[in-house]
Each structure stands twice: as structure tokens, then as C-alpha cells.
Amino acid sequence: MIADNLHKIKQDIQDSCALVHREPKEVTLVAVTKSVGVAQTKELIDAGVAHCAENRVDKLLEKKQKLLNYSETKWHLIGNLQRRKVKLIVNEIDYFHALDSLTLAEEIQKRLVKQLACFVEVNVSGEATKHGISPDEVLPFLESLAAYSKIKVVGLMTMAPKEASAEQIRNVFGTLRELRDLVQSRHYTHAPCTELSMGMSQDFQLAIEEGATFIRVGTALFKDEEEE
Ligand SMILES: *Cc1c(COP(=O)(O)O)cnc(C)c1O
């Protein structure tokens, strides 16, 4: 089942890339395993997924601990990170997708042993319930991050609004791409900002058409699977 879902998603990635003349290898599939257990996560990795993501610190650590034989797997923390949990997690992950404050950056800097690839989360749609900085804050925030030598800003991340038309979602993703291009044009050494983390099960095809390089897909990989 999981292998079938994965196959279908890979096909969709190829189709979306073809529409806009991109290469499928430019898009990294990050499997969001937050709704499943270790067995299904293993099944997914065995089927060829190289990147896994969790939104909770405790769950990520627990899974990683149970998957010690899968040392090649890259781990992404995609959810909001509380300051007091920073020290537990920052040296255990390969990517952090939700950097949105300088106090958090300061704590991450303090606890990191080596550099960490981070995405700055931007609240493009402006919904009050969403995390992330506003689009106007992106450049000043990025400039301030130069003070934290262990934080490497590899890109920007956003979440599309849930109840929105395809056009509205496309707009959100397009805006994030323009912000990324703006940051890139500044050639900050601490923030190459080449990547765009956007698109989930419902909207990853639109995200790819708008330039996503990391898509975060959960439910679509596990549909028709039993909960453990
Ligand atoms: C849960 C989650 C996803 C995956 O969502 P699906 O709709 O299950 O694909 C992606 N990004 C973040 C930040 C999430 O919390």
C-alpha cells in the first residue's frame, strides 16, 4: 500500500515538473511520518524514501532511536520548536523548517555542535493562527541571522491556507518564491537561501509548479493504511 502511494506521488511529481519544464530531481520528497508508527516508517524507507519529518521533538527522537539501522535517513523537524526543547533536538536533525524568531535562533546557536540547515518560516497568508514571520520582516530577519554562525539559512518555508482556492494557494507559493529570489539576490554568505519548502498532500502539485524544492507529504503516503 505504502509503496503504491509512493509510486503514485512520484508520478505526480514527475507530471508537475513536466508541466513547468523542471527536473524531478530538483524536488525532494520529505515524508511526514507524524501520523504513523515505526513499522510504517520503516516500510517507507525500505520503499526508497530518504527524508523523513516529524513535527514533535519527542516523537522524532523516539523514532530515530528505533531506526538506528537506518542511519542514512535524513531527519527534518517541521513543527514549531519550544526553546526549552532546543538542546534535545538540534544535534539530532538534518533540517529545521520553522525558524521564526531571534530568541529561538540564539538558543539554537548556543546548543549546536555543528552547522544546521534551517528554513525560515514565513506566514505569507497572514492568518493569525499561523507561525512564521511576515513577508516584510524577511530581509531584516535574515540580516540579523548573520550573527549566528551555526545557522545556515538554506531556504524559506510556508504553509498554504487550508480553505482556499487553487489560485489563492498558487499566490501564496508564488509570493514565497519571489521572497526567496529577493533574498538570493543579496548573496548573504550565511543565507544562500536556494530552497523552497512548500506543498503538502493537498497542494504539492501546485507548489512544484510554483518552484518548491522540498515538499512535505504525510496523509497522501499513508492513505488506506491501518493506524498502528
Ligand atoms: C502535517 C504536516 C505536513 C504534512 O501534511 P499532510 O497534509 O498530511 O501531507 C506538512 N507540513 C507540516 C508543517 C505539517 O505539520
Image (cartoon, grey):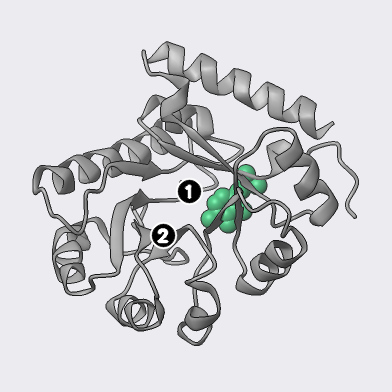
Q: Residues within 10 Å of mark 1 (few under 14, many from 20)?
A: some
Q: What percent of the width, then of the height, locates residue 71?
A: 64, 53
Q: Residues within 10 Å of mark 2 (few under 14, many from 20)?
A: few
Instruction: State whether residue 213 is above or below residue 158.
Output: above
Residue at 61% across, 38% down: 201
Element at badge 1?
A: loop
Could you tell me which quadrant the N terminus lies in? top right
Which one is nearer the viewer's eye here, 69 or 23? 69
How far, Cα to Cα, is label 2 from label 1? 8 Å
Residue at 46% across, 29% down: 206
Could you tell me which quadrant the C terminus lies in? bottom right
Residue at 64% across, 38% down: 49
Instruction: State whether residue 23 is above or below residue 61.
Output: above
As drawn, the label of residue 127 is: 2
Q: Earlier in the sequence, mark 2 or mark 1?
A: 2
- The quarter of the picture where residue 172 lies is top left
Residue at 49% across, 71% down: 91
Looking at numbered disc 1 in the image, what kind of residue is underneath it? Pro
Q: What percent of the width, then of the height, locates residue 188?
A: 13, 54
- The quarter of the picture where residue 2 lies is top right
As drawn, the label of residue 161 is: 1
Q: Is residue 29 left or right of residue 132?
A: right
Label 1 near label 2: C-beta < 8 Å? yes
Q: Is residue 34 left or right of residue 89?
A: right
Element at badge 2?
A: loop
- The quarter of the picture where residue 144 lies is bottom left
Looking at numbered disc 2 in the image, what kind of residue is underneath it? Glu
Instruction: State whether residue 127 is above or below residue 150.
Output: above
Q: What percent of the width, then of the height, locates residue 9?
A: 64, 26
Instruction: State whether residue 34 is above or below residue 26.
Output: below
How many marks the image carries: the answer is: 2
